[in-house]
Amino acid sequence: MPTTVTVSAPRFEHHREALGIGEAAPRLSWKVTAPPDWRQRAYEVEATGEGRRWASGRIESPDSVLVPWPTGPLASRERRVVRIRVWGDGPHPSSWSSPAPVEAGLLDPGDWTAVAVTPSWPADRDGDEPPPLVRTSFTVGRQVAQARLYVTAHGLYEVELNGHRVGDDALAPGWTSYSSRLRYATHDVTSLLVEGENAVGAWLADGWYRGRLGFHGGHRNLYGDRVALLAQLEVRYTDGTGETVATGPRWRAGLGPIARAGLYEGERYDARREPAGWSRPGFDDSGWAPVVPVERDPATLVAPTGPPVRCTGELRPVSIGTSPSGATIVDFGQNIAGRLRIRVDGPAGTTVRLRHAEVLEDGELCTRPLRGAEATDEYTLRGGGVETWEPRFTFHGFRYAEITGWPGEPAPGDVVARVYHTDMERTGWFECSDPLVSRLHENVVWSMRGNFVDLPTDCPQRDERLGWTGDLQVFAPTAGFLYDCAGMVGSWLRDVAAEQYPDGTIPWYVPEIPGGDWTPANPGAVWGDVAVLTPAVLYERFGDSGVLRTQYASAKAWVDCVAARVGDDGLWDHGMQLGDWLDPAAPPEDPAAARTDRYLVATAYHAWSALHLSRIAGVLGELEDEKHYGAMAERVAAAFAAEYVSPTGRVVSDAQTAYALALVFDLIPSAAQRARAGRRLAELVAEGGNRIATGFAGTPVVCDALSSVGREDAAYALLLERSCPSWLYPVTQGATTIWERWDSLLPDGTVNPGDMTSFNHYALGAVADWLHRVVAGLAPAAPGYRRILVRPRPGGGLTSARARHETPYGPAEVSWRLAGPELTVRVEVPTGTTATVDLPGAEPAEIGPGTHCFEVTLR
């Protein structure tokens, strides 16, 4: 085989790092770089470990994405090194890929010998006690071959071994449905051990486990009233022996320099109280308190399916100035989720105070939108030289920071904003000739970064930060293009299933907590449909049928739950619904009071989810379910048409969202009615001055609806409008993320007076998926982009656009340039895929891998 055929190192499931995984038989994926006419016909997998080698032999298959594990399952702790080679049409294989290690975590509850421990002193249920430290020492008497630390906590933790930080995870172990699933991490700590005495210690804090969560003051101790550490350090020596150092009665607990740590409140740290050397050998912990055990069923401990939260970037200030009140105001030029790192020199006892906000109002921090989130960190200096500090157990949503108490003035580099989110791989890019649209897309990316912080949240700044199901449901297609979020979202969907009510109701947010005025057991369209539509998106974008199987029972339960509430007429026309949430016409005090009937939205979504569940059943071979839910979708669609669509094609509510849902969800029976509905939607857009008139339900589909009836002109007019409300209005106001409300900042420069105003919400940025698929013209035509649809539709005066996506098979790209009527399109198709190129005024063409150029004349 020519040496030009190369195979990437295999990847296991959706892991960026395959250490301590929870799958005993992980599926494999790889990418091939080859000449355009090459096709994979077969592959071979080789696995080595423990002095043994196993090879699959030649497997006849063109597949290279999530192929079955071809050998015996991994045992707990088992490590193998895997490589791949492939065949094309010829008799000779490619060279072997680079080797990739994979190592199982603790796969059986019986593997855990550690007992979760907490300080023996009484817990303060009001959350006023300082976060504790826990530690122990142990002896290593022989040469170490390998050491693994398996660790999790009730609350948040950071571990140190012999004075060195273990790993770079933040906010670990994250937030899951703790009673059902608590993630643990696996760390290779071989290099941190020394012969002789060693010490291991951990910082603990409340986090989501017992910290304040939710609206109207929130709730504490939702999962328990004690923080605790569960750690198991397994050491294997070169002579074949081993030992385990696990949390248990020998550990000790003390207090450290953190006086307070809360996700909403911030962190207060007194460096004078640091117990020197507390995580190093030789520390005297005789004055520390004993620990006591805390119950944790090891059957609930699960390995992660996606990457952890990490610092993914740093921002230097773009300006440092003084507010009218005399405070130092630092502007980082970008709204983020994260925290500050400071470098300061001053007298002992000096306290530097850091407050955070997304916007300024009258030159001061505007903290009203934070509601009950203090978002304030404090650092008290130890004195004696330059000190560097960053909070451990909090994060904030902010662009601006107010600094008071600084000794002197901060110099350049003394204050840095650190960006934190789940460390997903970036996979999607877009740009075009209009800088405002390109900036809009960049704002979508930043809002995803700011809200994919262990789970998909609504906002990162105020006293909320919850996993709202509807937000993710509408944004999932955009998310799946921009980042490889399959592992993270798949994990969260398991929590969706774990928190689902016995009757199939999906909570409004997951994990579910008390709060607000929501009726938890009341099912809501758009939000509850995440159980069906988001697994379908993961299958479409990542080619993962496994997530369909994992979530199948949950998806069925949701559709059956709604079906049980639908009347004999097939309509879902009762109960609490948020409908087209945050329609700009809705009053600030009632965001659900949209122009489109909320029960029209509910019935449309019921038909859409039933249809997708039928398709999912077909993929999984559940043929009876495929027929059942297909027939259900047809009945509900007919009921929708009978109730909401006139014989001429007008739709009840006569609003943009009503037409958009009916068109995109294919709920209009005849071609003539559909054409009339399309014309009316375009008329409504024009009558509204091309301003947005949709909320959470309509915004993701309104441009697609116009495109589907050949009215890209109206879609572009909607996209490019700059007056309020519009997608570009926030950009003209200096926004660097997507706002929750179309007018979060009013044209007069004041902040929206509503008590629900965020400047970092990704839901209304779901239009980015239309930018990728229609403006640039890059869309999946088969699961995982096995087939690609190249269908750009230039318009709006744009002269160029480009989208690039790292598909499971490799990079795909569409770029086009318009010079007068001449359209030039460049297409890159990855090995292992094909594409249909559908350009305006030309017959569709089928192409294979490689780079292709096309020219057409637009008329």
Image (tube, rainbow, N blue to C red):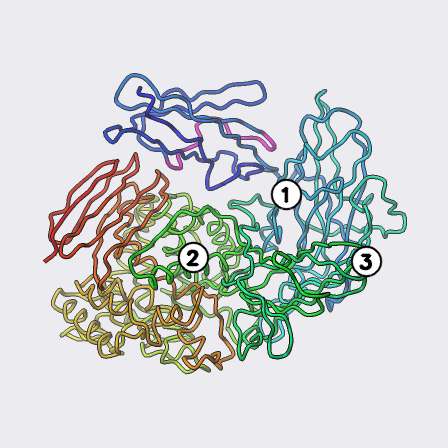
Q: CA distance from mark 1 to mark 2?
A: 26 Å
Categorize mark 3 by other alpha carbons within 10 Å: few (<14), some (14-19), many (20+).
some
**Percent of width and height locating residue 658:** 27, 72
Q: Which residue is mark 3?
A: 272
**Residue shown at 54% from the left, 80% from the top:** 362
Q: Residue 822 magenta-drawn? A: no
Observer able to see residue 465: no
Quick one: quadrant of the N terminus? Answer: top left
Q: Earlier in the sequence, mark 1 or mark 2?
A: 1
Above or below, comparing residue 116 to residue 583 in the picture:
above
Q: Residue 66 magenta-drawn? A: yes
Q: Earlier in the sequence, mark 3 or mark 1?
A: 1
Observer able to see residue 430: yes
Labelled pair 1, 2 in contact (Cβ < 8 Å): no
Above or below, comparing residue 452 to residue 25 in the picture:
below
**Residue shown at 49% from the left, 55% from the top:** 497
Q: Which residue is mark 2?
A: 445
